[in-house]
Image (spheres, rainbow, N blue to C red):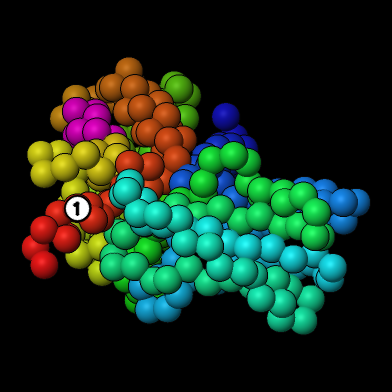
């Protein structure tokens, strides 16, 4: 495999998995469109917001379309609160009250021209999670290092499949980058966002933390198997495939979640 094609393939696989993970994640905005009495309504419903302000839900639609917003705290027995969407120029705007870090709201948006109300986003409520702000000087290196780790992980797997290449140096880079991104920068990001540096095994069930741990353990096995200069191709291929599968799991699935019942008990 020629060097140019080798790296092109590695980049394409990495970018493809990263985009898929991002767009299928539970914090990615829910997008779609609906027709209300012949008027097309395009929507982008947020599923992530920061704790510094109320979360804006805006629909770019002209009069005579009107609408309302219903919400309640996620996984509680709260009654639904209904508020009208307010027209601001060519937009209908509603706001969800900000929550503590890891707090979630379930909400529904409906639009109407005065007759039948059309719910947007399907029958199930949209769930939005709040997080504390994470500074750019931290989140940018974290994303770049994790992307580089995935790229080198993919490169290691491709090198292991090519008998003309030795995968060892790619394995070393993959292990180093995954450790830095997943166990140094990642916990710092989570500490800023949700107040807990690690929520995976054995402390919790955070899927992002747990899948990072699983991928890293596979790479440790590949690293040990390749000591003394051995290519350890089966181990490297297995680690690369497992990492790719893990990265295809939507980001933030089963992530940090505030238990409102426990919060109320402490009051």
Compared across the picture, whether 259 is left or right of 140 comes to left
Residue closest to the eye, 146 or 194: 194
Q: Position of residue 42 (x, y in %)?
A: 75, 56
Q: Percent position (x, y) of residue 231?
A: 29, 25
- Kindly state the secondary structure of the residue where label 1 is placed: helix
Quadrant of image for the C terminus = bottom left
Residue at the (53%, 58%) spot, across then down: 70
**The N terminus lies in which quarter of the figure?**
top right
Badge 1 is on which residue?
261
175 vs 87, nearest the viewer: 87
Furthest-right residue in this view: 38
Which span of residues is magenta-colored? 213-223
Taking the spot 63% from the left edge, 41% from the top edge, the residue there is 122
Say whether residue 214 is left or right of residue 59: left
47 is within the stretch colored magenta: no
**Where is residue 233 drawn, in percent x and y?**
33, 21
The answer to which quarter of the image holds residue 201 is: top left
Whether 113 is drawn above or below 228: the answer is: below
Chief secondary structure of the magenta portion: helix
């Amino acid at each position: 495999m020629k060097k140019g094609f080798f790296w092109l393939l590695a980049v394409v696989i990495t970018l493809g998995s990263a985009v898929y993970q991002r767009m299928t994640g539970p914090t990615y905005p829910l997008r779609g469109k609906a027709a209300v009495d012949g008027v097309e309504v395009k929507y982008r419903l947020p599923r992530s917001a920061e704790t510094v302000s109320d979360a804006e839900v805006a629909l770019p639609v002209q009069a005579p379309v009107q609408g309302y917003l219903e919400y309640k705290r996620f996984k509680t027995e709260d009654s639904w609160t209904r508020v009208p969407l307010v027209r601001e120029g060519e937009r209908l705007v509603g706001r969800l009250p900000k929550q503590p870090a890891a707090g979630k709201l379930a909400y529904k948006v409906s639009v109407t021209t005065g007759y039948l109300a059309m719910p947007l986003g399907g029958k199930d409520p949209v769930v939005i999670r709040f997080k504390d702000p994470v500074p750019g000087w931290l989140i940018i290196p974290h994303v770049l290092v994790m992307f580089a780790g995935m790229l080198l992980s993919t490169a290691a797997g491709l090198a292991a499949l090519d008998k003309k290449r030795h995968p060892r140096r790619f394995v070393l880079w993959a292990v180093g980058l995954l450790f830095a991104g997943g166990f140094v920068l990642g916990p710092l990001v989570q500490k800023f966002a949700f107040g807990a540096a690690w929520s995976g095994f054995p402390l919790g069930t955070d899927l992002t933390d747990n899948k990072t741990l699983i991928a890293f353990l596979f790479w440790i096995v590949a690293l040990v198997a390749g000591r003394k200069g051995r290519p350890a191709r089966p181990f490297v291929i297995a680690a690369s495939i497992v990492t790719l599968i893990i990265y295809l799991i939507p980001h933030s699935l089963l992530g940090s979640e505030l238990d409102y019942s426990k919060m109320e008990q402490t009051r």
